[in-house]
Image: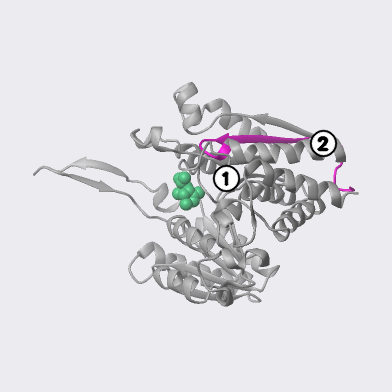
Amino acid sequence: MSDTGSRRRKLLVLPGDGIGPEVMREVKRVIDWMERRRGAAFEVEEDLVGGAAIDARGTPLAESTVRLARDADAVLFGAVGGPAWEHLGFDMRPEIAILRLRSELGLFANLRPAIVHDPLVSASTLKPEVVRGLDMMIVRESTGGIYFGEPRGVEDLPGGGKRGFNTESYSTHEIERVGRVAFDLARRRKKRVASVEKSNVMESGLLWRQTMTALRDEEYPDVALTHVLADNCAMQLVRAPSQFDVIVTTNLFGDLLSDLAAMLTGSLGMLPSATLGAMVDGKRHALYEPIHGSAPDIAGRGTANPLAQILSFALLLRYSFDMEETALEIEGAVLRVLGNGLRTPDIMAPGAARVGTGVMGEAVLRELEKASG
Ligand code: IPM
Ligand code: MG
């Protein structure tokens, strides 16, 4: 309760497409609850992104939305994309919204935790003894690498046919700043960082490895650093995931490995993420989003799991608004709801009660209410 304070915090809510708006609705109920019951004061703006913005304005991310995001203390993002927009060219795809927000706000460190909550051990496709107690963090570089590297394009070949090309590139500066985020996090955890690249085939991977080693030696001698090739890392994640504490890796490998790690936990529907920029004048741009996508196959049915979006909001309270207590309360409420046996279809277990998006959100609110007496 000491956690509320009077300063109005500027929050930009971007629900996006597919299940995005459905799961965001449940977060808005949590925000309402905090304002009503806790006197928390948020200045909430909401805007369209992705396919929804393409349909309404002809662009996946309007300049006015970028301005709102720059101006906000934090951005809560849903999900973008869907079959309706798949035919569009690359610069017009819904996915551009999240990629441009990361790059315009300089959000270079994407934190993707993979935690196996005890009540959900059996939701994993892996054996319980392999995943029980798993608590790892993937730090994915998110403004560089092959996602943004130049040159890129598709060109016609003289003899017919085409050539598509992209460029993987990383500078010392880009590697160091994301490396520091990983080492700093590790210091508050088990003090182990695994740096993941393909230094056996890629020059940028070799520079990545050498830069991480130098950074550890110079600034983080107390943290254990190992180097793992990306393919081996994928294998190790499935074989014995608990060996990892913090993984730091490139944009593309982080995209792949974080989906893999998320699935160890049994459901993408459970995992939040935070994407942080550099601290400038005491302010850090940050965006919070669930790891799952817009899930067009289940959109509109009211069956989506809202917990990753709600947990993303908890991360936002923790990292951007310094409201640790409230973040813990929300996380605790989510765990109790799971402990009580409520499950959306994606995490369904034998003997549990199958519920939809709204009932799950309602249950979290009830737990919050109960805990605050
Ligand atoms: C993610 C997504 C995005 C990415 C897409 C939607 C552009 O897969 O956040 O992992 O590849 O970064
Ligand atoms: Mg991805």
Residue closest to the eye, 263 or 261? 263
* Residue 181 image position (x, y, % from top left): 61, 60
Q: Is residue 244 part of the magenta span, yes or no?
A: no
Q: Colour scheme in the image?
A: one colour
- Magenta segment, which residues? 1-20
Is 1 positioned to the left or the right of 277 in the image? Answer: right
Q: Does the image show residue 280?
A: no
What numbered label is drawn on residue 35?
A: 2
Mark 1 or 2, nearer chain start: 2
* Residue 185 image position (x, y, % from top left): 66, 64
Is 318 positioned to the left or the right of 164 in the image? Answer: right
The residue drawn where x is 63% and y is 39% is 24
Residue closest to the eye, 357 or 89? 357
Residue indicated by mark 1: 304
Local secondary structure at mark 1:
loop
- Nearer to us of marks 1 and 2 is 1
Local secondary structure at mark 2:
helix
Q: Is residue 3 part of the magenta span, yes or no?
A: yes
Q: In this view, does 64 lie above or below 118?
A: above
Q: What residue type is labelled 2?
A: Glu
View extreme (top): residue: 57
Q: What residue type is labelled 1?
A: Ala
Q: Does the image show residue 42?
A: yes
